[in-house]
């Protein structure tokens, strides 16, 4: 208990320092020694009030949209909606286990390394605090997603008491979320007890097998998520919540018991990247490029270079160099493929169910704010390194074509695969075959143009909104899909001209 009290005091002091830092970015001035700080406290209350009003407004809008989506779904859409939570639970479990096997979830900052790693404090104490901090964040995100899906399910099934349905879904999701991450922490702690596990290549890929297994044996792997859906509809069995709660408690007790034997040297070694990024503070948000560079440096330092650059000249040399970079980081191509598949699936879902324009706007904002990681991986290195750029005597458009060929093909392949799998009519299928490559190229060009500006994030959002929005507006106003296709091509020509004019 003394260790818990000492760690609680340390975590509270760190939280106050962190809160003061982030509040200062919003204009807060901490009181000087000897001051009462009434004005500063009043300003904090003002910020909290603004945040509460903003979150309430956004949540209300999101819930209204999900209610409208649920009411607009056809029977096939309702059946697909009922499978969302079970599949999300399996995917979350697979990704959590994979992340725990790739790097332990016990992350230490530089301060933790100084105060905790070398102290005689019981090893299970920092593990417990780390687990609580991570699970609380996962609960906030997970319960928000479950609440949105619960509103859509209640609206689609016309349940008599939708508020009670949402509350039942939230209560059912709490032990499931805790169980998922407690099982992941079991594997993460075992990495620190047996460091040799970290030297097994591609061990982190093994949990991803859960996803295809869930396709083959859905009753075995999807039942925890189906229990949450049953809670929403009021058909949940009495044994569900006690069983998941006991399983979660057992997993927590297991990793706490094993944590008394962890190797803190291994924990420090695996936390270096996290500590470097967390030490950046606000700069980690403003300079995402630096964060990605730190992560790539850590990944490259852990393995030897694979393959060699073939001999070539001119454009072929640039294309082969980019292909070599993606061959050494194949996960970037996988992410591009999955991103294209997911966004195409969402677009098809919106089209099939004729959802309102607000959903299209959300889809567009998602494409602008969170494009596929790795799409411009090589191009950003070329454009943001002046020393390297001076040895590439060609315009930015040529550089874009050479550097993004591989990820664009992966992005287009994922979109086309999902579009064809929907089994649309011949006319609709042909439209998709025309639009997906054009929109993928347009997305890449928006990102490429933003890399040449001083404010890349704002430029990318503006360019994506204008180009995609103009194409959507042209199609909606004329009712002719080819009008949107022509406008999208005009956007490609304009952005290509901007890149071609810069060297």
Image: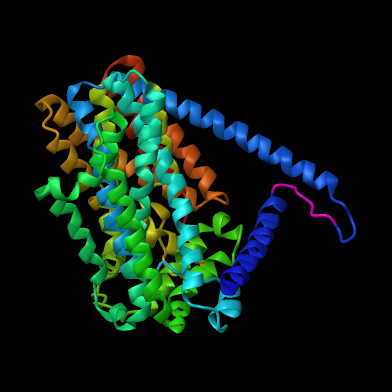
How far across and down, in percent of the image, does residue 254 sit?
A: 34, 68
Q: Residue at x 24, y 33 (%)?
A: 82
Q: Is residue 44 above or below residue 78?
A: below
Q: Which residues are magenta?
A: 26-31
Q: Is residue 38 above or below residue 75?
A: below
Q: Nearer the viewer, residue 478 or 105?
A: 105
How far across and down, in percent of the image, does residue 338 sit?
A: 26, 49
Q: Is residue 269 above or below residue 498?
A: below
Quadrant in which the N terminus is drawn: bottom right
Q: Residue at x 28, y 22 (%)?
A: 156
Q: Is residue 274 left or right of residue 258?
A: right
Q: Quadrant of residue 391?
A: bottom left
Q: Is residue 419 visible?
A: yes
- Colour style of the rendered protein structure: rainbow
Q: Principal SS element in the magenta part?
A: loop
Q: Quadrant of residue 206?
A: bottom left
Q: Is residue 206 left or right of residue 47?
A: left
Q: Nearer the viewer, residue 67 or 367?
A: 67
Q: Residue at x 36, y 39 (%)?
A: 492
Q: Is residue 485 visible?
A: no
Q: Is residue 411 left or right of residue 418?
A: right
Q: Nearer the viewer, residue 474 or 24?
A: 24
Q: Looking at this rendering, what residue extends furthest in the right direction?
A: 34
How far across and down, in percent of the image, does residue 503 sit?
A: 47, 56
Question: Does 27 lie within the magenta span?
Answer: yes
Question: Does 30 lie within the magenta span?
Answer: yes
Q: Residue at x 38, y 60 (%)?
A: 377
How far across and down, in percent of the image, does residue 443 sit?
A: 36, 43
Q: Is residue 425 above or below residue 47?
A: above
């Amino acid at each position: 208990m003394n260790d818990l009290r000492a760690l609680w005091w340390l975590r509270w002091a760190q939280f106050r320092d962190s809160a003061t830092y982030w509040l200062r970015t919003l204009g807060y001035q901490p009181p000087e020694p000897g001051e009462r700080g009434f004005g500063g406290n009043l300003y904090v209350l003002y910020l909290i009030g603004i945040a509460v009003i903003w979150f309430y407004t956004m949540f209300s809008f999101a819930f209204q949209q999900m209610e409208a989506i649920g009411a607009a779904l056809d029977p096939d859409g309702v059946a697909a909606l009922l499978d969302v939570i079970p599949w999300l639970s399996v995917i979350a479990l697979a990704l959590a286990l994979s992340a725990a096997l790739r790097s332990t979830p016990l992350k230490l900052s530089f301060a933790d390394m100084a105060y905790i790693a070398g102290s005689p404090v019981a090893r299970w104490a920092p593990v417990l605090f780390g687990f609580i901090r991570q699970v609380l964040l996962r609960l906030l995100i997970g319960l928000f997603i479950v609440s949105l899906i619960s509103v859509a399910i209640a609206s689609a099934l016309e349940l008599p008491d939708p508020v009670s349905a949402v509350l039942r879904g939230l209560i059912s999701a709490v032990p499931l979320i805790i169980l998922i991450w407690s099982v992941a922490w079991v594997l993460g702690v075992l990495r620190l007890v047996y460091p040799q596990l970290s030297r097994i290549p591609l061990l982190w890929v093994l949990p991803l097998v859960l996803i295809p297994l869930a396709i083959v044996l859905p009753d075995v792997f999807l039942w925890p998520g189906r229990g949450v859906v049953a809670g929403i509809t009021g058909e949940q069995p009495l044994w569900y919540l006690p069983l998941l709660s006991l399983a979660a408690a057992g997993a927590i007790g297991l990793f706490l018991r094993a944590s008394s034997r962890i190797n803190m040297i291994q924990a420090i070694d695996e936390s270096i990247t996290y500590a470097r990024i967390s030490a950046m503070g606000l700069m980690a948000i403003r300079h995402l490029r630096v964060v990605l560079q730190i992560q790539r440096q850590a990944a490259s330092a852990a393995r030897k270079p694979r393959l060699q650059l073939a001999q070539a000249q001119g454009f072929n040399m640039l294309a082969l160099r980019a292909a070599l970079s993606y061959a050494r980081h194949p996960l970037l191509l996988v992410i591009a493929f999955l991103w294209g598949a997911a966004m195409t699936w969402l677009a098809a879902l919106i089209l099939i169910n004729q959802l309102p324009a607000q959903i299209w706007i959300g889809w567009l904002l998602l494409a602008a704010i969170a494009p596929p990681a790795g799409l411009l991986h090589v191009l950003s290195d070329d454009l943001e390194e002046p020393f390297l750029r001076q040895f590439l005597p060609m315009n930015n458009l040529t550089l874009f074509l050479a550097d993004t060929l591989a990820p664009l093909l992966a992005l287009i392949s994922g979109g086309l695969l999902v579009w064809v799998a929907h089994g649309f009519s011949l006319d609709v299928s042909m439209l998709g075959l025309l639009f997906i490559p054009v929109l993928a190229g347009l997305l890449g060009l928006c990102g490429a143009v933003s890399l040449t500006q001083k404010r890349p994030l704002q430029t990318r959002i503006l360019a994506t909104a204008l180009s995609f929005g103009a194409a959507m507006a042209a199609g909606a106003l004329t009712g002719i899909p080819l009008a949107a296709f022509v406008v999208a091509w005009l956007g490609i020509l304009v952005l290509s001209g901007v890149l071609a004019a810069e060297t």
